[in-house]
């Protein structure tokens, strides 16, 4: 039996990822019956050690925030997972009786960190609150005035406030000033739209390289020439290729890299290097997101009944964050690019032949499995293929990401 999992990033004040909240479901066939299967899904998930076995792949060395309801706590289910990489998250609708509180105390004494999910200003169970290390505050459930009261209440404690469902960079900055320490939401993959970036000459050159590299029959000689005109891009690309464990000898030139890795692998590295050159002040997690989308769309394209060119699917995934990197709306960001019209209007949000796979990927990554279920059917893909595709894409993206940002160290929660 498959389990459908997605991860949502949690950032510190410097927009460095410290962990991911795990969202899961045991079945996509009956999306309307999510709550009734919660306990069964989690029990099987844990008892089969799915997370334990696949934790490194799914989490990339970061901490996992995993929800446990009352029954799972009483069954000692959290003990199945590593306390150094797992945070026990308790839903706020759990009524903590003495037996439950004793269990939470045992977990804390054993070294587990405890998080309370969905906290609101009127939360009544102070006996549980005293045992909590991290307080997750859902912005959709709290007003601006209640957020101020929450911050005031916990500002003199050692408890960490986590803001969930942040929808914009402005909200992130406001919450950071208020005193929140951790942040969750897809605000990081939305453009600020305060001032669009102007592409410098080097970036215009990179766009041309991107176009050349994604042609059906790339002109390797021309691509090499364009890359070598940009010393920073050349250094970045050689560093990426040299960081791979596939090669015994160091790559010394662009032509050498092409000869050693082959056109397809080279294109993958080149695409990421080009996107990274546009990063600016955004969190590098946005680059990882584009990697995951690119790989998922390629893998889905291989098994989908809709026969589409996988290079076109990959390019959609890659460019799906360009609006953020350029701080523009998607139409202004992608419009000038020399790519097929069908790809552009897919990214604009219009219906095209690529839309089912694109929206399947966007829905799955956010843990919106109802949307994933609907578009999986339209894309002609068997549901059982999705968990492995997601895991493969995560691992591929994390490995490449770690080559690009080898010095990034996640914040340690104490």
Image (spheres, rainbow, N blue to C red):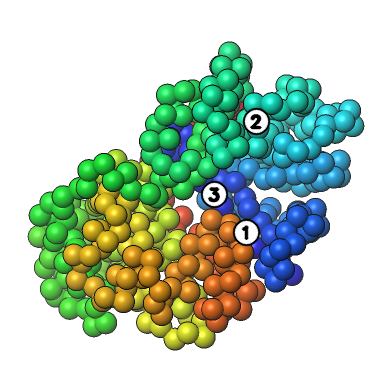
Q: Check disc 2 and report its element: helix, strand or loop.
A: loop
Q: Name the residue under label 2.
A: 120
Q: What element carries label 3?
A: strand
The image quarter in which residue 310 lies: bottom left
Report how far apart the C-alphas of labels 3 and 2 lie in the structure: 21 Å
Residue at horizontal 66 percent and vertical 37 percent from the top: 117
Q: Where is residue 171 in the image (x, y as percent from the top left)?
A: 43, 35
Q: How many labels does the image show?
A: 3
Quarter assignment of residue 177:
top left
- In terms of image quadrants, where is residue 239? bottom left
Tell me which residue sits at (44%, 69%) in the image: 358
Up the image or down, 182 lies above or below 355; here it is above
Mark 3 or mark 2: name the one nearer the start of the chain: 3
Q: Can residue 336 be seen in this view?
A: yes
Residue that appears at 61% across and 62% down: 369
The residue sitting at the top extreme is 156
The relative height of residue 10 versus residue 208 in the rendered view (above or below) is above
Of 142 and 133, nearer the camera is 142
Q: In this view, does 406 lie to the left or right of 151?
A: left
Residue under circle 1? 5
Return the x and y of residue 241 as percentages of the image width and height. Answer: 31, 61
* Residue drawn 47% across the image and 34% down it: 12
Q: Tell whether 95 sits left or right of 290.
A: right
Mark 3 vs mark 2, foreground winner is 2
Which residue is tagged 3?
8
Q: Which label is found at residue 267?
A: none
Quarter the N terminus occupies = bottom right
């Amino acid at each position: 039996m498959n389990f459908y999992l997605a991860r949502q990033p949690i950032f510190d004040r410097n927009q460095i990822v410290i962990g991911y909240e795990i969202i899961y479901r045991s079945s996509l066939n009956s999306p309307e019956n999510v709550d009734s299967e919660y306990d069964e899904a989690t029990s099987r998930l844990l008892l089969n050690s799915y997370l334990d076995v696949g934790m490194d792949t799914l989490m990339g060395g970061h901490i996992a925030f995993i929800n446990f309801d009352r029954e799972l706590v009483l069954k000692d289910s959290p003990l199945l997972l590593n306390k150094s990489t797992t945070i026990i998250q308790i839903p706020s609708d759990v009524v903590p009786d003495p037996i439950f509180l004793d269990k939470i105390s045992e977990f804390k004494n054993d070294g587990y960190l405890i998080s309370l999910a969905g906290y609101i200003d009127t939360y009544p169970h102070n006996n549980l609150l005293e045992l909590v290390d991290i307080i997750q505050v859902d912005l959709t459930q709290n007003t601006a005035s209640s957020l101020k009261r929450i911050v005031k209440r916990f500002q003199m404690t050692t408890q960490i406030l986590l803001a969930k469902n942040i929808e914009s960079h402005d909200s992130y900055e406001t919450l950071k000033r208020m005193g929140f320490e951790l942040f969750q939401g897809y605000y990081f993959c939305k453009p600020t739209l305060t001032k669009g970036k102007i592409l410098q000459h080097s970036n215009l050159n990179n766009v041309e390289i991107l176009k050349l590299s994604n042609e059906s029959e790339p002109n390797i000689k021309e691509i090499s020439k364009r890359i070598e005109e940009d010393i920073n891009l050349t250094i970045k690309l050689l560093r990426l290729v040299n960081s791979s464990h596939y090669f015994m000898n160091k790559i010394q030139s662009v032509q050498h890299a092409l000869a050693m890795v082959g056109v397809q692998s080279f294109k993958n590295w080149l695409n990421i290097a080009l996107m990274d050159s546009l990063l600016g002040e955004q969190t590098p997690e946005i680059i990882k997101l584009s990697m995951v989308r690119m790989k998922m769309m390629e893998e889905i394209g291989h098994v989908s009944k809709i026969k589409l060119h996988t290079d076109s699917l990959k390019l959609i995934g890659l460019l799906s964050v360009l609006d953020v990197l350029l701080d523009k709306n998607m139409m202004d960001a992608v419009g000038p690019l020399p790519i097929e019209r069908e790809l552009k209007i897919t990214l604009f949000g219009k219906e095209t032949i690529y839309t089912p796979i694109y929206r399947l990927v966007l829905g799955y990554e956010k843990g919106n499995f109802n949307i994933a279920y609907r578009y999986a059917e339209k894309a002609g893909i068997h549901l059982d293929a999705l968990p492995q595709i997601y895991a493969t894409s995560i691992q591929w993206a994390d490995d490449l990401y770690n080559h690009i940002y080898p010095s990034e160290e996640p914040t340690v929660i104490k």
